[in-house]
Image: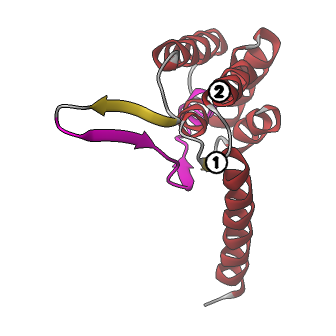
Amino acid sequence: MDDREGSSSTVIAALVERARVAQRIADSYDQARVDELVAAAGWAIIEPARNRELAELAVADSGIGNIEDKVRKNHRKTLGLLRDLKGAKSVGVIAEDPARGLVEIARPVGVVCAITPSTNPAATPANKIINALKGRNAVIVAPSPKGWRTAARLIEHV
């Protein structure tokens, strides 16, 4: 193992430990708190000035696409996901089938790792974060080398 591999392992271990601490906090959230958290994460990309900033960074970093298309994509993908998740149960008992004696209980799986493509460095991590948070999971985002500035800027606001 060379020095880069050792330092990468150290960084990853530290990220996982921080994520586990965060996940333990979110594990105690009720459905209302989870839904508030999800809405706040969605706003981190939908807020118009930030959305534009992220779109501009995405185009500058990746050299792919155009700003107006990225603004629309960030908005539509995130708004669509928020619409799909609205009212969805993700905490505690989420379904019961008394006839079969079954009770379905949602619980977090823990730390989720998310890889981000260079072609979509804002909406994809935002939507992965929102999905993870809906289940009270922590998430570690691994941005593409061509989109790391965009993902870093997004994560500052989530």
Q: In this view, does 151 lie above or below 48?
A: below
Looking at the figure, which quarter contains the N terminus?
bottom right
Residue neighbourhood size for the residue with mark 1, other residues' Cα within 10 Å, grouped as few (<14), some (14–19), many (≥20): some
Q: Where are the magenta residues, as a range?
A: 100-126
Please indicate, yes or no, whether residue 50 appears anywhere in the rendered image.
Answer: yes
- For label 1, the SS is loop
Identified by mark 1, the residue type is Asp
Residue corresponding to mark 2: 38
Left or right of 85? Residue 140 is: right
* Residue 10 placement: quadrant: bottom right
What residue is rendered at 56% in x and 30% in y? Answer: 127
Instruction: Let me know if residue 142 appears in the view.
Output: no
Please provide percent x and percent y for residue 109: 50, 53
Q: Which residue corresponds to the image point at 17% horizontal and 31% vertical from the top-left?
A: 99
Q: Quadrant of the C terminus?
A: top right
Q: Is 118 contained in the magenta span?
A: yes
Q: Position of residue 93 (x, y in %)?
A: 44, 35
Asked if residue 90 is positioned above or below residue 145 in the image, the reply reads: above
* Residue type of the residue flagged with mark 2: Val
Q: Mark 1 points at which residue?
A: 27
The structure residue drawn at horizontal position 60% and vertical position 29%, both measured from the top left corner, is 31
Q: Position of residue 139 (x, y in %)?
A: 62, 48
Q: How many marks?
A: 2
